[in-house]
């Protein structure tokens, strides 16, 4: 493969392109705690066998909690900045469904730099179930897509997934640590080639490759 375009070393500042950006340190500790509590609630609701009275009490408490948040909503598209130990900045969307820090529907996945790529660990509980005891294949694809996109973004390239291939090698179990790795393997004009794996106990359960296409930015 001919590599005739090296990824830009720094991801452009999204504020220069009209995006709202908050620093992850600006996310209130109370919101982080609430997100964790709601994740626990979702897991409890998905698996409960409680009786009607307990269910109605829980529903009323959930309705009260929803009302307590009022009508103030963060704008769709708001981004969050993570500053790495080396001072570099990485960006993601605040409510990203796989890794958004304020999204209780996200697992969440945290990816850190590791050599030329990224690595992270995540445990998926019963709310991510597809076949009995196993992670849903769509969520496996989502984890891989996020890792693949983040690897390209960490290399300084704002991009979207154009093509995603997933190989499901072995069933991916629930409620165990899953190790995710991803890296850029090449670039050609606006295309960035990336690959990623999910492992459990050192064995690959799924691997993904993608073609990411660099977004043309004004100017
Ligand atoms: C600074 C501002 C930041 C703005 C924020 C933007 C990005 C996000 C940034 C940070 C977020 C951080 C982390 C996020 C991490 C992960 C998120 C997960 C990833 C996703 O969740 S992302 C959503 C799903 N994704 C889409 O929603 C894409 C829909 N789609 C399109 O928007 C267009 O389709 C597009 C743009 C892909 C291309 O369109 P286009 O018109 O710009 O370019 P064009 O077609 O000319 O293709 C150019 C070259 O790519 C080749 N190519 C194109 N498509 C191909 C395919 N399918 N297979 C093989 N090759 C393909 C061509 O063959 C040509 O190659 P060649 O150079 O060789 O001719």
Image (tube, rainbow, N blue to C red):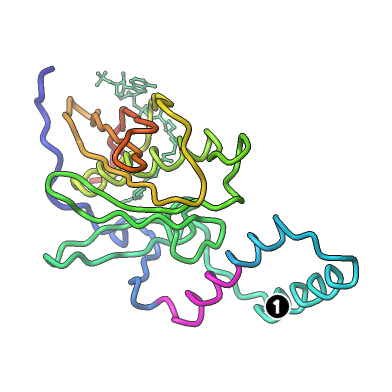
Q: Nearer the viewer, residue 103 or 139?
A: 139
| Magenta-drawn segment | 27-38
Residue 13 placed where, x, y %?
25, 59
Q: Identify the element where label 1 is drawn.
A: helix
Q: Say which residue appears at 42% left-offset and 76% top-offset.
A: 27
As for residue 33 lying within the magenta part, the answer is: yes
Q: Say which residue appears at 79% left-offset and 59% top-offset.
A: 49
Q: Say which residue appears at 31% left-offset and 27% top-offset.
A: 211
Residue 79 placed where, x, y %?
39, 61
In the image, taking residue 48 as reference, residue 187 lies left or right, namely: left
Say above or below: 34 vs 13. below
Say above or below: 104 vs 180. below
Residue 64 placed where, x, y %?
76, 79
Q: Nearer the viewer, residue 20 or 122?
A: 122
Q: Quadrant of ligand 1?
A: top left
Label 1: which residue?
65
């Amino acid at each position: 493969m001919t590599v005739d375009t090296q990824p830009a070393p720094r991801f452009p500042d999204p504020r220069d392109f009209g995006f709202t950006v908050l620093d992850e340190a600006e996310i209130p500790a109370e919101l982080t705690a609430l997100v964790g509590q709601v994740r626990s609630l979702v897991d409890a609701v998905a698996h409960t066998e409680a009786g009607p009275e307990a269910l109605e009490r829980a529903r009323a408490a959930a309705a009260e909690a929803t009302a307590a948040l009022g009508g103030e909503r963060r704008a769709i598209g708001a981004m969050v900045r993570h500053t790495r130990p080396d001072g570099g900045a990485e960006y993601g969307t605040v409510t990203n469904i796989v890794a958004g820090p304020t999204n209780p529907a996200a697992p969440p996945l945290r990816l850190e730099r590791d050599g030329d790529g990224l690595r992270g660990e995540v445990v998926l509980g019963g709310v991510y179930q597809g076949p009995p005891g196993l992670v849903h294949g769509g969520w496996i694809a989502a984890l891989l897509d996020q890792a693949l996109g983040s690897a390209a973004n960490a290399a300084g390239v704002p991009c979207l997934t154009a093509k995603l291939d997933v190989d499901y090698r072995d069933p991916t179990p629930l409620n165990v640590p899953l190790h995710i790795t991803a890296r850029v393997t090449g670039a050609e004009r606006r295309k960035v080639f990336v690959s990623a794996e999910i492992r459990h106990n050192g064995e690959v359960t799924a691997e993904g490759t993608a073609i990411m296409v660099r977004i043309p930015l004004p100017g």
